[in-house]
Image (cartoon, helix red, strand yellow):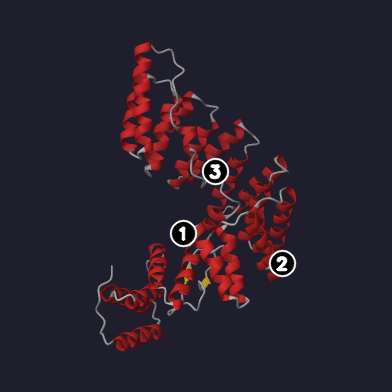
Amino acid sequence: MTFRWIALLLSGAVVGLTAGSVAAATPAAIAAHGAGETALFRPLDEALYLAQRSRSNLSEAEQEALDDLLSEGQDKVEARDYSAAIALYQQATRLDPQNARLYSGIGYLYVQQGEYASAITPYQQAIELESDNLPFRYGLAYAYVQLEDYESAIATYEAITTIAPNETDAYLGLGNIFITLEDYDAALATYEDLTRRSPGNAQAYEALGTLYLVQADYEAARSAFQRAVQVDDRRSESYVGLAETQLALGDSRTAYQNLLQAVRLDRNNAQANFLLGELSMELGDEAEAYDYYRRAAQADPDLIPAQAAVGAFHLSEGVYLQAIGAYRRVIQVFPNNPGAHYNLGLALWAEGLEKQALSSINRARRLYADQEDLESVDRVDALLEHWGVSGGGTDR
C-alpha cells in the first residue's frame, strides 16, 4: 500500500472491493495534501478582500454615490454575479482612487472567477496603497501560484516574511512551492527557519514531516510528526501524518490507533477515514471499510480513491445508481483509466442504460488496447459476447 496518492490504478473488473493500488504521489500532490491547508492552497477570506467604506475626504455627494456602488456591488457578490460586481467596484475606484480595498475587492472577485491573470494588477494597486496589508499580499501570492508563476509567488511570500518575520502561513506557502519545484533543500531551510521562529507551532512540524515523507526519510518524518503532536495534541492532521510514517515503517497497529484519534478529533478528516478504510480492508472487515470509505467520500467528494472504493462497494452490492455517480467522479479526474470506464459500464448496463454502457465498455477496450493489456481486451470481448452485443458503441 502506498500513501499520499495521486494516480489510481483500478483493476479491470470490480476492483475487488477497494480503491485498488495507488501510485506514488508527485511532489506537487504531496505539497497540496501535506501540513494542512496553508496560504498556498487556502481559499481567500471574502471578508478581508471586499471593499469597505472609504476613509478618504470625499464630498457628501461623492460619498453617497460611493456607498450606493458598494451596496449594489455587495448585492451582486451575494448573487455570485462577479462580473457585474467588478464593474461596480471599478466605477467606485474612479470616485475614490485611494481606497486600497476597492482594488483588493476587484482582485478577489477575479480570483473567484478563475481569472488569475486579471487579479494581479488590482492586487498590486492595493499593495501600493497599503504596503503593510498582509492579506493583500497573500491574495497576490495565491493568484501567482494558480498561474504557476512560482518565481513571483516566492518573491511575494518573501516580502511578507520581511514585513512580518513570524508570519507562519508565508513560510508554509514558500515551503510548498519549493516542494512543488522539487527544491527540497530550500524547503527544508524554510521549514527549519519556521520551527526556530515558532517552536510552539504544530503546523511547522507537520510541514517538516511532510517534506521528509516526500524524501522517504520516514524516521525523520515520524520524529517531526511526534513533535507536532507534543506541541498540540488537538490537531487531527498531526495524527494523520504520524500514522502515514508508521504505515511506511510497517507499524500498522500503531498507525491504526493514531488514525482513530485523528477521526475522534475530526470526524470529517477525509484522509484519516480513507486510510482507516484501507487498513480495515487489510483486516478483512469489509463493512467497516465501506463505512470509512463512505465517510471519506462525503467529507471530500474530490478524494478520488475514496470515490473508487465506494463505487466498487456499490457495484458489488447492486446499488448501481450510486456506483454510476462514484465512477463518473473518478473519470472526471482520470478520463483515460480503463478500469473506471469498465466498472461504469457494468453499472450502467445493470441500470438498463445499454447505449451508455456500451460507450463506456468500448472506451475501456480502446484504452486497454492502447496499453497493450491484451488480457483485459479479451475480458471486455467476453463480456460483450455475454451481453449478446458487438463492439462499436461511441465514447466521449
Residue 363: percent from left, percent from top: 32, 74
In the structure shown, which secondary structural element does the residue marked by tag 1 occupy? loop
Q: CA distance from mark 1 to mark 3?
A: 22 Å
How packed is label 2: few (under 14 Cα within 10 Å), some, or many (20 or more)? some
**Residue drawn at point x = 59 percent, y = 41 percent:** 169
How packed is label 3: few (under 14 Cα within 10 Å), some, or many (20 or more)? many
> Is 189 left or right of 301, judged from the image as shown?
right
Residue corresponding to mark 2? 254
- Mark identifier at residue 334: none
In the structure shown, which secondary structural element does the residue marked by tag 3 occupy? loop
Residue corresponding to mark 1? 301
**Three-letter amino acid code of the residue under disc 1:** Pro
**Residue drawn at point x = 34 percent, y = 13 percent:** 61
Residue corresponding to mark 3? 39
Judging depth in this view, the residue of 277 and 367 nearest the camera is 277
Circle nearer the N terminus (1, 2): 2
> Is 3 left or right of 198, judged from the image as shown?
left
